[in-house]
Amino acid sequence: MVWRAVALLLAAFVLVSVFGQIAPISYVNSGSMAPALSTGDGFVAVPAAVADDPDPGDVIVYRSQEIEAGGLVTHRIVGRTDGGFVTKGDANPVTDQQAGEPPVSRDRIVAQVFAVDGRVVSLSGLGTVSMTIRSAVRTSPVGLPPASMELLVLAAGAVLFWRGR
């Protein structure tokens, strides 16, 4: 049963990567979400277009306007206002909005972090592996985007690992 779930997730990663969505496997590069996600942990980012409506307690990936130089931020929704969602890194002392970020509107949400029974499913150390692969494979010889090549390398590594057991 576990192998079937892994196969379905892998198939979903491939389909999402091929059709150009935001990379379905992502990672955190800070400790702001500890202990749910530690620095270097990977996670499955379910694209907002196919994810359920976000609620307080969900961890989302959103495009910031003020913090993180306008980049992507992975934080938990801790509340709602008329202007959007209030977000906060689990390890941060204040909300993103107290730090100057406007409330997060739905159109700025890129993805939701995959969770089971409210617990984030993290892939320990995958971020470190992912960063290494992405830096080594800027373009693929067959024209696939780096995220797709990363997925293929990870899948090949997983197959080799399990066959060798």
Image (tube, rainbow, N blue to C red):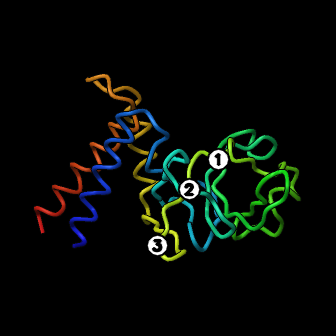
Residue at 24% in and 58% down: 7
Residue type marked 1: Ile
Q: From the viewer's perspective, is 160 left or right of 24?
A: left
Q: Looking at this rendering, what residue extends furthest in the bottom direction?
A: 117
> What amino acid is found at the position of numbered circle 2 in the picture?
Gln
Where 80 sits versus 63, above or below?
A: below
- Give how far across and how far down residue 124 sits, in percent: 44, 66
Residue 9 appears at what percent x and percent y? 32, 57
In the picture of the structure, the residue carrying the numbered disc 1 is: 109
Q: Which of pointers 1 and 3 lies earlier in the amino acid sequence?
A: 1
How packed is label 1: few (under 14 Cα within 10 Å), some, or many (20 or more)? Answer: many
Residue 112: assigned label: 2
Residue 116 in the image: state x and y as whole percent: 46, 72
C-alpha distance separating marks 3 and 2: 12 Å
How far apart are labels 1 and 3 at the CA level?
Answer: 20 Å
Q: Is residue 47 above or below residue 39?
A: above
Q: How many marks?
A: 3
Tell which of 123 and 17 is nearer to you.
17
Residue contact at pointers 1 and 2, CB within 8 angstroms: yes
| Badge 2: residue crowd in 10 Å (few <14, some 14–19, many ≥20) | many
- What is the secondary structure assignment of the residue under circle 1? strand
Note whether 113 is above or below 138 in the view shown: below
**For the point 32% across and 37% down, which residue is it?**
149
Spatial separation of the CA atoms under disc 1 and disc 2: 8 Å
Report the residue marked by disc 3: 116
- Residue drawn where x is 44% and y is 48% of the image: 24
